[in-house]
């Protein structure tokens, strides 16, 4: 089952992030050929999830979707999860811009929890789009599941490094952390940290909630944004061994009712037949929530495991990349040129901010690239998508050879 495999991957990722086990892969950014070779040699549970995540690290969004969906059995296909009343109810609703709704509601909320699918950078870009509005609404703490307590100077350094966490190695996750630090959030890890806390799924959920609760004990009026994976966002009781997810435990321990936001269910898949039937009927131009004439937000029927369900439009492409990377024109394309390097294609191009130190001797100390693309041919016309500024571009080929150049992106 996909759900079990995904839980295994998340669990291993959490162990790596906590430092209980070490990640021995010194090159998280690998070319497609290398990822596919590893996938074919890997027969363990969750190998499709690992491949999907590896593709997401190098900006191969479509490949990440394809590999994630290979053995994915969506929850809505389970008996009783989707019923006709959901469709009838949704017909009485209209889409509303999700960022506007969430930020408006945030004024009266103390805790907001939003989830992601770990292979999908779109979800991180969306959470990043909320940061400024939430900061203006009084939010000052940002907790991310993937972060590790080992990076004790993240808030002083002001940018994430390879050793900061597990999923944070993906460029858009790194950018999410960067933006939160730039705005003035205190960024903190809340993952389980000991063998006892990792003893079971239940103990892990409890530990995560307790670590967030510790922030509230220090600052009882703290307004906290949490970015988590998959089902950690669910605040209602569960029928599995967890009994309650992190969100539910946090509500139990603090008495604070969090605003919980799901991004996973209404996001495109590579196989439309696996998409939720309600999502298949949508025709959206922007991330939206559905609200009826009474001001009631969907869900609330059979899918009422969270307060809000964000529906993301299908991805459009420009410059060989998803248009959501452009952030409504705030970021710009940068096209690489043949004369900038002499390595043979295919190769990776990793864009690092010029003011973030790249430590050659300590791989774990290297910053997260702002963007990564795989160059396979010059006919593709594939661009890096970057905010204006100065960058170091490092090219990396199949043999591990590297070249570096500097650019000013205007």
Image: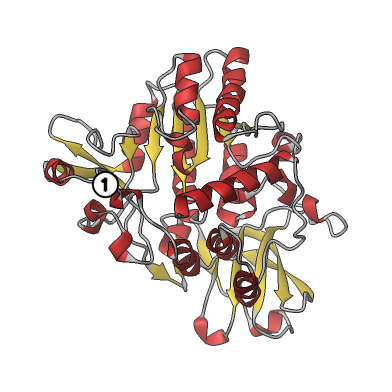
- Does 282 sit left or right of 364 as displayed? left
User: Which x, y percent locates residue 197?
Assistant: 65, 29
Residue 103, located in which quarter of the rendered image?
A: top left
Classify the position of the C terminus by image quarter.
bottom right
Task: Check the image and report above or below for 356 versus 401.
Answer: above
Task: Check the image and report above or below for 231 versus 374.
Answer: above
Task: Check the image and report above or below for 383 versus 353.
Answer: below
**Residue that appears at 50% across and 64% down:** 64
User: Which x, y percent locates residue 239?
Assistant: 39, 33
Residue tagged 1 = 79
**Residue that appears at 56% across and 65% down:** 55
Toward the right, the furthest residue is 361
Q: Tell me, yes or no, if residue 316 can be seen here.
A: yes
The residue lying toward the viewer, choosing from 1 and 373, is: 1
Give the colouring mode of the picture. Answer: secondary structure
Q: Tell me, yes or no, if residue 357 can be seen here.
A: no
- Does 375 sit left or right of 404 as displayed? left
The residue lying toward the viewer, choosing from 234 and 186, is: 234
The residue lying toward the viewer, choosing from 399 and 96, is: 399
**Residue that appears at 37% across and 63% down:** 315
- Does 210 sit left or right of 163 as displayed? left
């Amino acid at each position: 089952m996909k759900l079990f495999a995904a839980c295994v991957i998340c669990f291993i990722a959490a162990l790596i992030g906590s430092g209980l086990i070490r990640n021995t892969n010194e090159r998280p950014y690998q070319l497609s050929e290398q990822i596919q070779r590893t996938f074919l040699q890997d027969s363990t549970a969750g190998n499709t999830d690992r491949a999907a995540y590896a593709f997401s690290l190098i900006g191969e969004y479509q490949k990440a979707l394809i590999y994630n969906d290979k053995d994915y059995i969506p929850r809505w296909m389970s008996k009783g999860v989707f019923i006709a009343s959901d469709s009838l109810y949704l017909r009485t609703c209209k889409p509303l811009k999700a960022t506007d709704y969430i930020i408006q509601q945030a004024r009266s909320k103390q805790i907001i929890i939003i989830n992601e699918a770990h292979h999908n950078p779109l979800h991180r870009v969306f959470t990043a789009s909320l940061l400024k509005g939430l900061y203006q609404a009084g939010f000052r703490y940002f907790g991310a599941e993937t972060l590790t307590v080992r990076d004790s100077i993240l808030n002083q350094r002001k940018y994430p490094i390879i050793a900061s966490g597990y999923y944070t190695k993906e460029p858009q996750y790194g950018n999410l952390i960067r933006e939160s630090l730039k705005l003035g959030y205190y960024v903190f890890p809340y993952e389980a940290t000991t063998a006892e806390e990792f003893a079971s799924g239940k103990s892990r959920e409890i530990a995560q909630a307790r670590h967030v609760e510790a922030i509230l004990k220090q600052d009882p009026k703290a307004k906290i944004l949490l970015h988590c994976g998959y089902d950690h966002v669910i605040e209602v009781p569960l029928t599995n061994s967890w009994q309650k997810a992190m969100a539910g435990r946090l509500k139990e321990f603090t008495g604070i009712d969090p605003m919980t936001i799901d991004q996973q269910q209404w996001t495109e898949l590579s196989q439309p037949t696996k998409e939720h039937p309600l999502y298949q009927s949508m025709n959206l131009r922007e991330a939206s929530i559905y609200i009826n004439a009474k001001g009631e937000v969907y869900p609330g029927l059979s899918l009422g495991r969270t307060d809000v369900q964000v529906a993301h439009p299908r991805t459009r492409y420009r410059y060989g990349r998803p248009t959501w990377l452009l952030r409504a024109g705030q970021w710009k394309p940068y096209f690489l040129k043949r004369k900038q390097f002499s390595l043979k294609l295919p190769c990776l191009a990793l864009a690092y901010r010029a003011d973030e130190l790249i430590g050659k001797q300590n791989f774990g100390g290297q910053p997260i690239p702002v963007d990564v693309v795989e160059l396979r041919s010059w006919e593709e016309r594939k661009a890096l998508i970057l905010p204006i500024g100065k960058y170091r571009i490092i090219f990396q080929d199949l043999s591990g050879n590297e070249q570096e150049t500097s650019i000013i992106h205007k």
